[in-house]
Image: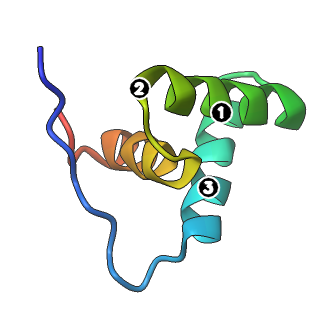
Amino acid sequence: MPVRTATPPATARATDVVGLALEVLAAQGLNRAAAQAALSAMAKDRGLTVARCAALVVAAVDGRVG
């Protein structure tokens, strides 16, 4: 099933989006190092940059992807 992608707001910087994605993963019980590793692995698996993968995680939690 193809994933619909949502673009983060233009004002959001990549570091902000990555930080938010790490918070989302931490809320799932991962420590910071594990969250960073998971985000990197997800990005690599999908052939995306870490920032783009983080934007998708944040958008999914925000209800914009689905």
Farthest residue in the front direction?
A: 47
| Residue 46 vertical position relative to residue 8 in the rendered view, above or below | above
Q: Which mark is residue 46?
A: 2
Residue 11, image x, y percentages: 41, 85
Disc 3 residue type (three-letter): Val
Farthest residue in the bottom direction?
A: 11
Residue where numbered disc 1 is placed? 40
Q: Quadrant of the N terminus?
A: top left
Residue, x 65% and y 67% (percent of image)?
Answer: 15
Residue 4 location, quadrant: top left
Residue, x 33% and y 49% (percent of image)?
Answer: 59
Q: Earlier in the sequence, mark 3 or mark 2?
A: 3
Residue 23, image x, y percentages: 67, 46
Disc 2 residue type (three-letter): Arg
How far apart marks 2 and 1 lie (CA) works out to 10 Å
Q: Earlier in the sequence, mark 2 or mark 1?
A: 1
Q: Secondary structure at mark 2?
A: helix
**Marks 3 and 2 close (CB-CB < 8 Å):** no
Q: Secondary structure at mark 1?
A: helix
Disc 1 residue type (three-letter): Ser
